[in-house]
Amino acid sequence: MELRSRIGQGYLVVSVAGRLDTGTAPEFESKCQAWLNEGNVRVILDLSGLEYISSAGLRSVISTAKRAKGGGGALILSGATGLVQEVLAVSGFDRLLPTFGSVENALDSLA
Amino acid sequence: MPEPVSLRHYPADVDFVPAAVAETLSAVDRVGLLDEVRAVRLELALEEVLVNVCRHAYRDQRAPRGEKEFAVEVRALPDRLEVSKEDSGRAFDPTTLSPPDTDASLDERLVGGLGIHLVRSMVDGIEYRRDGERNRLTLTMVVGAAATGG
């Protein structure tokens, strides 16, 4: 898993690439929590480089979303394709959280 | 029933799940009946099943570490591919669990309960059997003309 973050238009854009599974979900969750604790509660998750997500990955996403909401912000999903898009759909995550085709689409819509 | 094309045993420890999944998927790949999209669905379902075994199957048992194991078997049949998992943990039939409420709001949404839902969603069939002291769970992927990818 590769994790990168940048600030864009008032949002923290977190790019997660590779696999978000039992092995990598704890690191994802703790990094996101650290960023949220720094006050970055408006988060766009860029999933365009993510190839695989398991239920452990989904749990880390939902925990992060709850923390963001608790801090007065929100977690927004973007860029999912293939298996990741399919998993988000069957789990209802694309109805649970604001979901966009790309980070750019998200920023345009939220501006 | 044909002989398995692959049968391997592993300690019931999540550290062994990545190897178990990778070796099983290599065997599936060698059989050559699943396209990439369906192979990765099977991979996800298998990971969920195996993590569940390692986390829960032996939780109440004081068996020596060496006896806490699972086996994964791959069988190629004319119309389907079967991947079976066996363990000697407590009897557990995941096919009877009710699905999570995927329409719940963020506040109501529970953090767990998604694994078996994903398994059901990713494979064409799932069957549980208690064989004596063994749990046997078989994941089925239809192959050939009846298979639907995409």
Image: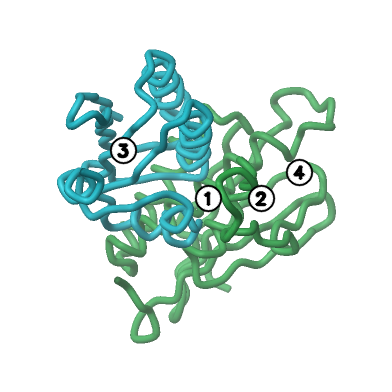
Tag 1: amino acid: Leu
| Circles 2, 4 touching at the beta carbon (< 8 Å) | yes
Q: Where does label 1 land, which residue?
A: B7
Judged by depth in the image, the label closer to the viewer, 4 or 1, is 4
Tag 4: amino acid: Ser
For the colour cyan, the matching chain is A
Judged by depth in the image, the label closer to the viewer, 1 or 3, is 3
Tag 3: amino acid: Leu
For the colour green, the matching chain is B
Q: Residue at horizontal 84%, vertical 32%?
A: B60
Q: Where does label 3 land, which residue?
A: A45
Mark 1 and mark 3: span between their CA atoms? 39 Å
Residue B88: assigned label: 4
Q: Chain of mark 1?
A: B
Same subunit: marks 4 and 1 = yes
Judged by depth in the image, the label closer to the viewer, 2 or 1, is 2
Q: Is residue A53 above or below residue B126?
A: above
Mark 2 and mark 4: span between their CA atoms? 7 Å
Q: Nearer the viewer, residue B115 or A91?
A: A91
